[in-house]
Amino acid sequence: MMMLTKKMIEIRGLLQTVGQSDSLTLPSIVVIGSQSSGKSSVLEAIVGHEFLPKGHNMVTRRPIELTLVNTPDAQAEYGEFPALGLGKVTDFSQIQRTLTDLNLAVPASDCVSDDPIQLRIHSPNVPDLSLIDLPGYVQVVGRDQPPELKERISQLCEKYIRAPNVILAISAADVDLANSTALRASRKVDPRGERTIGVITKMDLVEPERAVSLLNDKKYALRLGYVGVVCRVPAGAGGGKLFHRGSGNIQNAIAKNENAYFSAHPQFAPEEQVEVGTRNLKKKLMHVLEQTMAASLKTTSEAIQRELAEATYEFKVQYNERPLSAESYLAESLDGFKHSFRGFTESFGRREVRELLKHELDQQVLNLLAQRYWNRPFDDLSPPFPETDPLSSLAKADPEGEDSIWKIKLDASSAALTKLGVGRLATSVVASALQRNIEFLIANSRFSAHPFARQAITEASTAILKDLSYDISDELEICIKPYKYRIDLEDSEWAKGRDNVTTVLKEELKVAEAASKRLEEVMGGRKKVKDVMSFIDRVRSGQVVLEGDGVGGAGGFSQALLSKGREAVFLRDRVDILKLRILAVKSKQCASRKNKYHCPEVFLDAVADKLTTTADLFLDAELLSKFYYQLPRELDARLGRGLSQDEIDRFAREDPKIKRHLDVVRRKDLLEHVLKEMEGLRQLEAREKRAVSRR
Ligand code: GDP
């Protein structure tokens, strides 16, 4: 029969993980008694260890669901708090401290909480039992305790002592049974005394005759009877002083003390037919629990079937019977991400790197040209820079003069470009483009709803890129080194540069013209803009002298309009210059590379192109291919093999939709599993019944 209880207790534990529902559980033994009735002493005598919270300050505030697991072949005794994940606790004083902390975490103002603490104790010295220890009934509410304390405890106990649970009602022998709060509470819910076991503690404190009369109480007759015990830990055997942890020896000491007492008094002799002793109490508890649990198997099975039908229905209707586990979800998500990453690697290669780099270097060339050739300051209200028309000055230059200003200018500009730190610039431009694309892939993947995974991928990609960039930018710098000293251009390269820079300048022109147009609209039409601009021009050419600094408006124009006007002048001049530059590039002079000093735009563009060609080849081979190889492996490490079961669960449950799906699948699986176990149990029970009847 032992096996049956063990199995049923296991199932009870499984059902607890399915969720709290009154019908979805197997009965347990609920222990009630008033404070100081000896309730803790009885439980500790059964377990063989002191482990319950002690103290005057109402230390039991939450129910303790105590599951005792008999481990006949194991020496070790230990406790486990499944909800806390502390692992095996072999030190029972540690269990006691943990229980005390968990109880004291309930604020005194709340009195009690009905959230149970789950504790499992494994030992060769305990029977297989499931017990629930409840806060002791208080007789008198202390001055520092809330007035509703008594009521709250009663309500909590009432909830637990409902059928089909077995009630273990503890009363002390030295208190009149009529005053026993435990028996009174029990009588309310079990008036015919069918599922209550009476325990009379402190039998040693009253005369044996009186003790016996208590056990034979007829006022509240119990079908399961009364058991008398002496559970005091004899001085010197423990009591928290000489307590040997793990040895379970308070059990022996209590038993010895108890036996000595009962054998010393003939009133308790076996022929007197009174039930005494902790050993007998344990046997009784095992027997009663097994009977009660077995009797509940059928109704619990039915309840499970109902729940299962509901879960199956939900699974079918809501999730189309799509199986899901946290692992499969993670694996699929990771595969999906790697797949889209592969797609990206095919679309982002040398050509794309080239475009990025060329664009970046075009901008650098434009900046250089602006600084070194077209640096006419356009600052609004100051007189114009006295340089003459740039186009004509270029034309007048002596192209043959070895150290002409134009040669020096071009050499300096070209050096500025090659010494820009192209290695680092190009590497970082490409690395940031890769990072941006990864962010985009994440945002469009399942991982977008998972902060943990998003972070893991971003970190993986940043780490790889950072690591690669360091060496690559140095190596690339070495690759372009020759251009720092000498740049030879082919005719074809010149022609290509001329075409490209024309396009770039035209683009710039378009942007400037569009900005001009927008400004026109804002300022209220072409005519208005013209008026304002001509006023500003007159100021700039000295025809008009401003009074003061122009703040607050001038020439009949408001301050705001003047400021817009300055922008318009800037844009107009920029458009003029760009047109001029385009003309220059397109001019006959710039058709041949021989005139490179006249055509810095073309020359620098061709240089930028050469740099780009070197860089794109190198970055494609070094940065892209290495990154494309390393990232999927790093993701496997961070999101695949590297994660514990807990982390995988936590990950999958970050997405509320997945969490609900997983919960339904889990509930269904668990219920199916429990139901199967229950079937096995019922067969086992039937076999045992047959075996008993044959004996
Ligand atoms: P609880 O408040 O109901 O948990 O009561 P305890 O188990 O803490 O016991 C209250 C007091 O009664 C403690 O001082 C125990 O040592 C003492 N006690 C418990 N059982 C017995 C017993 O069988 N005989 C004697 N003499 N004292 C006992």
Image (tube, grey):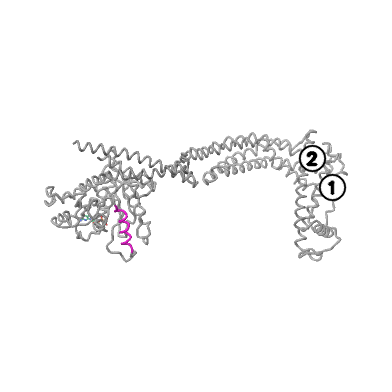
Measuring 85% from the left and 58% from the top, which residue is drawn there? 541
| Whole-percent x, y for residue 23 in the image | 34, 48
Q: Is residue 554 above or below residue 126?
A: below
Q: Is residue 562 left or right of residue 355?
A: right
Vertically, is 108 above or below 287? below
The relative height of residue 176 versus residue 116 in the rendered view (above or below) is below
The residue positioned 49% from the left and 46% from the top of the image is 657
In the picture of the structure, the residue carrying the numbered disc 1 is: 390
Locate residue 595, reporting x and y percent.
84, 38
* Location of the C terminus (image quadrant): top left
Read off the magenta span. Answer: 148-162
- In terms of sequence position, does the residue under pointer 1 or pointer 2 come before the other? 1
Circle 2: residue type: Val
Horizontal relation, residue 397 to residue 360: left or right: right
Q: Looking at the rendered structure, which numbered label has been put on residue 146?
A: none
**Is residue 496 at all visible to an observer of this figure?**
yes
**Mark 1 falls on what kind of element?**
helix
Asked whether 338 or 374 is in front, the reply is: 338
Which residue in the structure is indicated by mark 2?
Answer: 602
Where is residue 292? Give x, y as percent: 26, 46
Q: CA distance from mark 1 to mark 2?
A: 16 Å
Q: Is residue 235 visible?
A: no
Q: Write down the quadrant of residue 170 in the picture.
A: bottom left
Prevailing secondary structure of the magenta residues: helix
- Ligand 1 falls in which quarter? bottom left
Whether 152 is among the magenta residues is: yes
Q: The residue under label 1 is which amino acid type?
A: Pro
